[in-house]
Amino acid sequence: MITLRGRLTQFNLPALERGPVIVRLSDRTDRPAPLSRLEAFIHHRGPVPGGFGWYLVKDAETLALLPEGAAAAVLSEDFQHLADGDVVRLEPAKGAIRTLFRKAVAYNHFLLTERCNNYCLMCSQPPRAVDDGWIVDEVLEALPLMDRAAREIGFTGGEPTLLGARFIELVQAAGSHLPNTALHVLSNGRSFATGSLARDLGAVRHPDLMLGIPVYADLAHVHDHVVQADGAFDETIRGILALKAQGVRVEIRVVLQEQTVPRLVPLARFLARNLLFVDHVALMGLELTGFARANLERIWIDPVDYQTELTEAVGILDRAGMKVSIYNSQHCVLEPSLRRFARRSISDWKQEYIPECAGCDAQSECGGFFTSAKFRYSRGISPIVKAA
Amino acid sequence: MAKFREQAQFDSSAQSAYTMLPWRFTPLDEEGYVATNMAGEYVTMSASEVSDFAGGALRPDQPIYDELKSRHFLIDDDTQVAIDLLALKIRTKLAPLANFTGLHIFVTTLRCEHSCPYCQVSRANDDKREFDMSEETALRSLDLAFRSPSPAIKIEFQGGESTLNMPIIRFIVAEALRRNETARRNLAFVIATNLAVLDDEILQFARQHDILISTSLDGPADLHNRNRPRPGKNSYEKAVEGIARARTALGHYNVGALMTTTAASLPQVRAIIDEYIRMDFGGIFLRPLSPYGFAIKTKSYASYDQKKWLEFFFEGLDYIIELNLGGFEFIEHYSAMVLKKMLTPLQTSYVDLMSPAGMGIGAVVYNYDGVVYASDESRMLAEMGDTTFALGNVHDHDFADIFLGDALLEPLEQSFAASVPGCSWCAFEPWCGAEPVFHHATQGDFVGKKPLSSFCTRNMALFRGLITRMEANPKVRRIFERWANIV
Amino acid sequence: MTIATGDARTVTLSRAALSVDAAKRAAYALMARYDVDVAVIGDDIVCRLLPANSTVSMETAERDFRREVIDQDLRISIEERTAPYRDAILGLAFSRTGLQDG
């Protein structure tokens, strides 16, 4: 696992005189001066070019190679992965560095707020009622610095749409600064049920936007129980209808757990009959962090025990012509006929394999585990050995 | 640490009464009923469940309660979004109506070298041109066709034997393509032909303009030739040879075949299906008996033939299901169209099973002489002396006269199933159709007394047969779900 | 075709329990088997059943007719009680502004 936050050993004196800043990293020696002034040079080896606003080095000895008066920091071992194109926030006064964007990562996602109007039993990012409006400012500042060739970025929370007009502003900014980058937003959809938010979002005409919205059952009380909010189901469905009426792409997400498996097949029928026009359905294995870990006994069901329901549900959706994917599931616990729906979905900073995986022929297709999976593994984990 | 509430705390059904949404019920078999909602979704129920539900006495702990809630038969204090979703589903089913007429049938000639006893319209192929469509008629007909608001226009050439008048086919195709440069519709052409007079020039022309071929294949050789006599007694051989040549020239999937069901077909359904399999078709449409011509004259059509046909149909369907269960994919197209209405939120374009009726709205026929008919059956009826469904003439009438005149609107309005006795309370109504032409021909009015209607008997048996099979076997249900979703 | 008067059956229903409309609908629904004459006499609905043709047996006629009337009565009751929702849903389905405000 890779650390994204960590204390630095050392900011030098010129750095300590300067306030917190968001910068893009460069390792190039031929950067034009107007740009390098605004960037941080990340040193791997060799000569150090002048003209950069900041310098990030791997050891204290390299400080001697820097230009006179250059603001610099020595990176701890945890930050040796930083590279050209990354975007970081430097806070010299706190001796802190935070990675905001990694060019090498296929999918960077941004938590926009920790506030939420649901309270899901298995929430991997438990809500906090805090005033965290500063996050929006930070993301807006970082967006223009991000790599324009990035394939995809995500907005998550909490519930991003609680930001109202600022949420629209963020989507607009993402579309403007990263027009070739797909934007995937995770939301419960409730804010779109009434008012003009859906229309405002449609009016942005982001070039490649998809909203991932969870629907946990075909019955309101079952869904409301999972998200711990009365009336959430009706609002979520109305929100989905409003978004589709505005031409916004919607993906339905279903987390596979004790509460959702019993009605998985009726849910599939419900989606095929009522929400046939959604753009994607994602059926997802549990991530055991946050509330999911605290509620483990309540929500856990071994994947090998729901393969029947999963096969039937996927079949119904697939036969109806809907696009279906299975996320966060290992190939060995999946019914073989379902493997073609499985995607490698776990971000690399969370992904791992375990000793039981040794010798498995499917490792390159399989998505592996969340690090948090160590709290409960399926009894079905075992290597897939292809016939000789 | 957060406090998490239990599921029961989100479930108000135990504390408060449910509200019924509009629904209908009809017996399924001796034991149970079929119930449908406004969008045509169905649930099977026992008699006691029907009376409990209707009487407000259904308990939330009964499994049927959740099923009815999920499928939008009831709402309660927890959720009302069923209203929005039902409205959306109904809108989806009805939306294609706004496109109006999509299928435009041009009868290029009545001449034909076959003499099929079930055909009402053909004339001998004596080389006289009096039964051929003229260019003037073709042009006026095209005027009307392109007045249709439909974004997709399918022009189908029929006859007699349509290819006996190739010049007018070429003329119409060229003229339609020219007009389409500005009209910009999704334009498609089909030639319905018995393939007996097929030559390379016709195939070359069809290939050039992406024209599909639709032909007749009634079954194995002896059945086909008995149904479809021609000089040389070789209709079957000609059809088989023609299909092969057409597939080579136009592509395998661009050649389709339809069977006509006659009394001679009824004992042979497996052989007919085997013939279609042998000929490498992906499916078959087990068509109903045509009531027109001889049968109407003698009024003998109603019960005996219908019963025999249902046996024929279900023997065929069960055989096809057996093939699918064994891993061989083969579709029964009549079922597929009905299943699409039953299992999906989408609408089909099967003209015979539409309400409001498909006549005029779904398809229209421009006869060789310029008379416009609301459907092919309307044309057949006229040949027998009844011109009730002749809507006008392309030479004397305009679009408004024909499509907004009483000849079309009266039968459409009167036969609309949701409003007529029998249908308005029938659970199968969302899947069924209005058939004003058939009822006029057999009973003398556009609506018909449905208990006496073989159209009604046939469809009810079909719906019941499909439901019973799906409910009895989940594997059959999966096959049916696949069929319901073929485009 | 001769129908013996012995084939006639009479079903008497109470207007307190069932509606005349239900009896009429039942008569319609069963017309392939029975010719039914529906008459209102005081608080009773008196229905006279005859075979519709010579192949029909009257053995189960009363039972068939009673069951059909009960079913039809239930249907009428459902239609009446759900009529407001039917109108609301159809109104929503046909509305030009769509399903969401804004």
Image (tube, coloured by chain):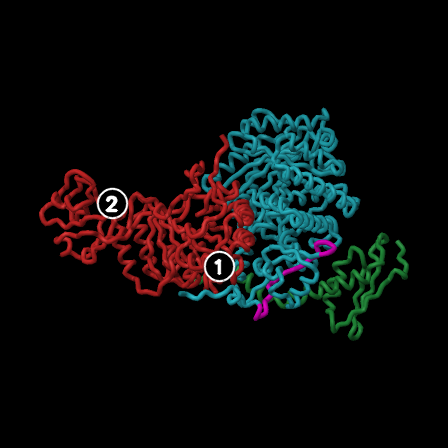
Chain colours: A red, B cyan, C green
Residue at 74 percent across and 68 percent down: it is C20
- The single residue placed furthest to the bottom in the displayed view is C42
Q: Residue A298 has which mark? A: 1
Which residue is the site of mark 2?
Answer: A80
Quadrant of the rendered structure where residue B244 is?
top right
Three-letter code, disc 2: Gln
Compare residues C9 and B140 and report the one nearer the observer: C9
Quadrant of the rendered structure where residue B301 is?
top right
* Discs 2 and 1 lie in a common subunit: yes
Q: Chain of mark 1?
A: A
Residue at 45 percent across and 36 percent down: it is A361
Q: Does residue A139 sit above or below A323 in this rendering?
A: below
Name the spot of residue B158 as percent of width and height, x first: 62, 36
Three-letter code, disc 1: Arg
Residue at 45 percent across and 65 percent down: it is B4
Marks 2 and 1, Cα distance to the nearest angstrom? 40 Å
Q: Is residue B207 left or right of residue A287?
A: right
